[in-house]
Image: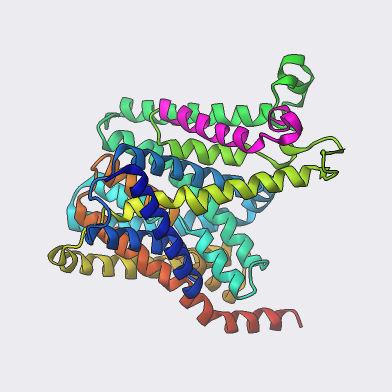
Amino acid sequence: MDPLLHLAIIWAAVFGAVVAAKKTRLTPVLYFLFIGCVLANAGVLPLESGAFIRTFAELGIIFIMFALGFEESTDNFLASVRRSWGIALFGALGPFVVAYLIADSIWQDANVSLMVGLAMTATAVSLTMVSLQGLGLSKSIVATRIMTSALLDDIGSLVMVALVVPIATGAGELTMAGLALTAGKAVAFFLIVTFIGFWIFPKGPLEWAQKLPILRVLSMQNYLTFDNGKYATLAILLVALVVGLLAHMFGFHEAVGAYMAGLIVREEHFQLAAKEDAAGRSLTQGNVYKETKRIVDNAAFCWIGPVFFVDLGAKILFDWDLLREVMPYALAMTVGIFVIQIISAGLAARYTSGMNNAESLMIGLGMLGRAELAFVVMDIAYVQHSIMPVEAFFTLMITAFFLNVLVPVTISWWRPYYLKATSDLMR
């Protein structure tokens, strides 16, 4: 198929998926995957994507992961960590253990079980936040706890992916020396990114570096505000791509680097001196930052990023015998993760974060979703490296679908009880 025709069909599918998502108030990711699957099985999309679409899809997931990191305020994140670490730790550990044990009992392969566990670890915070926003709870304390905990889970999952994938693919040896080498490379990469983050911060631990002429000239602020910020979008996406390539040099997925790049970029990097453009419009920090963020989000979630999910969905080829085989596995995985996620995150919220019972259960329900990062792990394990069999891939896809549907349903069901409990406490 002609690459441009292929892209045109995918973009048409993306538009249709967004319309369906708006009507049903579910995450568009589910529809991207579903429509990609339907079109591939109907013969509209080819079973094997060409190099152009595959590269476009990889660029899409890099942009998505960068946008997710860019979304988070570093200061707000650090301020919430103390209250959310328990929710993140136990809310991720429980699903990982359950998914690992179920996968190990079915496929009896440690590498497959590890990847299945990692795929089911990270929470789809975007789906939960959309659901909470629709119910008027986006500014609540539970929304803040879920956001921070999910971000911590994502970072932890990315670190584990960076460690596990080289070992699972045979690039790193399963020995103490091999594990130490893989762990050392991961630590070295994150230390380099952290140092870059400190260096380019206008204010921070290495503020003295900004006094050195060459470092002051090379600061992120000067880089992003060149020519009144006209090229800020190009500059920031170049940062995402370069740090992604840096991650690849260390043997990790480019998405890991892109996510870290998003975390180290801060709003003050876009600060401009008070000026006006030729049309008399004020060129303030907010204008440049907000416009750049709008363009980045548009690229990541509207026209580049969705290609990744549609292309991934196209890998799901209907096989009724296979579907009948994996459905019991998917149901077992769904029930197991549903129960353990609510118990582990809920108890952690109650006893490590000081939430009441109603808030704790809402947090547990809000952390059920699985979206972007789960599908990144599936793509790495199934499409790129063939670590997991097709049965495991189908099982994870069906499980993620069920869990995502349960998020808006259960949150809507619990909302009246949550509001009553929190209003009673305020009297």
Rendering coords of residue 231 (x, y %): 66, 34
Q: Residue at x 57, y 80 (%)?
A: 415
- Asked if residue 402 is among those painted magenta in the image, a careful observer would answer no
Rendering coords of residue 101 (x, y %): 27, 57
Q: Residue at x 60, y 79 (%)?
A: 418
**Quadrant of the rendered structure where residue 273 is?**
top right
Q: Is residue 358 visible?
A: yes
Residue that protrudes farthest toward the left in the picture:
321
Residue nearest the viewer, comparing 306 with 404: 306
- The overriding secondary structure of the stretch rendered in magenta is helix
**Quadrant of the rendered structure where residue 186 is?**
top left
Q: How is the image coloured?
A: rainbow
In magenta, the rendered stretch is: 220-249
Quadrant of the image containing the C terminus:
bottom right
Q: Residue at x 54, y 35 (%)?
A: 240
The vertical placement of 407 against 175, above or below, is below
The vertical placement of 347 against 259, above or below, is below
Classify residue 225 as left or right of residue 114.
Answer: right
Rendering coords of residue 331 (x, y %): 27, 70
The vertical placement of 405 against 211, above or below, is below
- Asked if residue 232 is among those painted magenta in the image, a careful observer would answer yes
Q: Residue at x 71, y 32 (%)?
A: 201
Residue nearest the viewer, comparing 194 with 258: 258
Counting every numbered tag in the picture gives 0
Rendering coords of residue 142 (x, y %): 61, 67
Residue nearest the viewer, comparing 37 with 207: 37
Q: Is residue 153 visible?
A: no
Classify residue 372 as left or right of residue 201.
Answer: left
